[in-house]
Image (cartoon, rainbow, N blue to C red):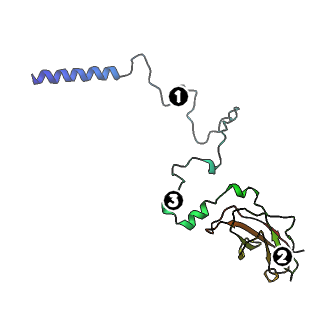
């Protein structure tokens, strides 16, 4: 019985191998050309002429637009409140008209003279944070104002240097309400 089972298994294996094999009327591909006139390729043979078809060009997105497999949203639970405030700047409806008043503000300074700047008021602002920056953007001076104007002291300015100012309104909790606005202050 064991012999009969082994024989049946052997016949079944042969039938499967025969069924999976290549048909006898199909020739196997050759690795080397069989034509005697064709020489095998060597490293010293010149390259064939380039194709006359233009290469397929696909537009690609800039690297900043590519999909990232890693989520870019950082969970807010891992960020302290100060860092989160830097990531998310508030925008309120009252901020729509908030801007530097360039018609009334001084955009040049004379050494030894104060500089006065103006901006539009925000109805619900409790105060305004005003800052003076040097030409590198470094904050040199910070103060607060209750009205939509400020006068910088003359001793803050040096002859021949360029400055800028920025202001933003803060609410009763000292939270920034709008994006900052400002302008340049240039020597004459």
Q: CA distance from mark 1 to mark 3?
A: 67 Å
Q: Quadrant of the N terminus?
A: top left
Labels 1 and 3: the sequence-earlier one? 1
| Residue in view at x 54 percent, y 66 percent | 81
Quadrant for residue 111, please give it.
bottom right
* Residue 128 falls left or right of residue 118: left
Q: Which residue is mark 3?
A: 76
For the point 30% across and 23% down, the residue is 17
The crowding category of the residue bearing disc 1, from other C-alpha atoms within 10 Å (few below 14, some 14 to 19, many at least 20), is: few
Q: Residue 117 or 35: which is nearer the viewer?
A: 117
View extreme (top): residue: 25
Sooner in the amino-acid sequence: mark 1 or mark 2: 1
* Numbered circle sitting on residue 33: 1
Is residue 64 toward the left or the right of residue 182 in the image? left
Residue 67, position as x, y percentages in the image: 57, 47
Based on the displayed image, in which of its 4 quarters is residue 116 positioned?
bottom right
Q: Nearer the viewer, mark 1 or mark 2?
A: 2
Q: Which residue is located at x 58 percent, y 42 percent?
A: 43
Residue located at (62% from left, 48% from top) = 65
- Count of numbered marks: 3
Residues at discs 2 and 3 in contact (Cβ within 8 Å): no
Task: Tell me the residue that label 2 is attached to.
Answer: 115
Q: Residues within 10 Å of mark 3 (few under 14, many from 20)?
A: few
Residue placed furthest toward the right: 188
Alpha carbons under labels 2 and 3: distance apart = 41 Å
- Dot 1: what SS? loop
Q: Disc 1 to disc 2, how far (Cα)?
A: 89 Å
Callout 2: SS? strand
Residues 144 and 25: in front is 144
> Nearer the viewer's eye, disc 1 or disc 3?
3
């Amino acid at each position: 019985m064991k012999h009969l089972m082994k024989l049946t298994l052997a016949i079944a294996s042969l039938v499967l191998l025969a069924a999976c094999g290549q048909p006898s009327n199909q020739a196997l591909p050759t690795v080397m050309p069989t034509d005697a006139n064709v020489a095998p390729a060597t490293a010293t043979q010149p390259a064939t002429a380039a194709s006359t078809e233009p290469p397929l060009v696909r537009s690609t997105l800039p690297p900043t637009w590519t999909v990232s497999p890693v989520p870019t949203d950082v969970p807010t639970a891992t960020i302290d409140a100060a860092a989160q405030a830097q990531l998310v700047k508030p925008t309120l409806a009252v901020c729509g008209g908030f801007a530097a008043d360039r018609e009334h503000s001084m955009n040049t300074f004379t050494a030894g003279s104060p500089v006065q700047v103006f901006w539009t008021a925000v109805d619900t602002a409790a105060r305004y944070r005003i800052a003076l920056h040097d030409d590198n953007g470094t904050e040199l001076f910070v103060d607060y104002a209750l009205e939509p104007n400020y006068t910088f002291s003359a001793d803050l300015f040096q002859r021949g240097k360029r400055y800028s100012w920025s202001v933003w309104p803060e609410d009763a909790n000292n939270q920034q309400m709008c994006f900052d606005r400002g302008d340049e202050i240039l020597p004459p």
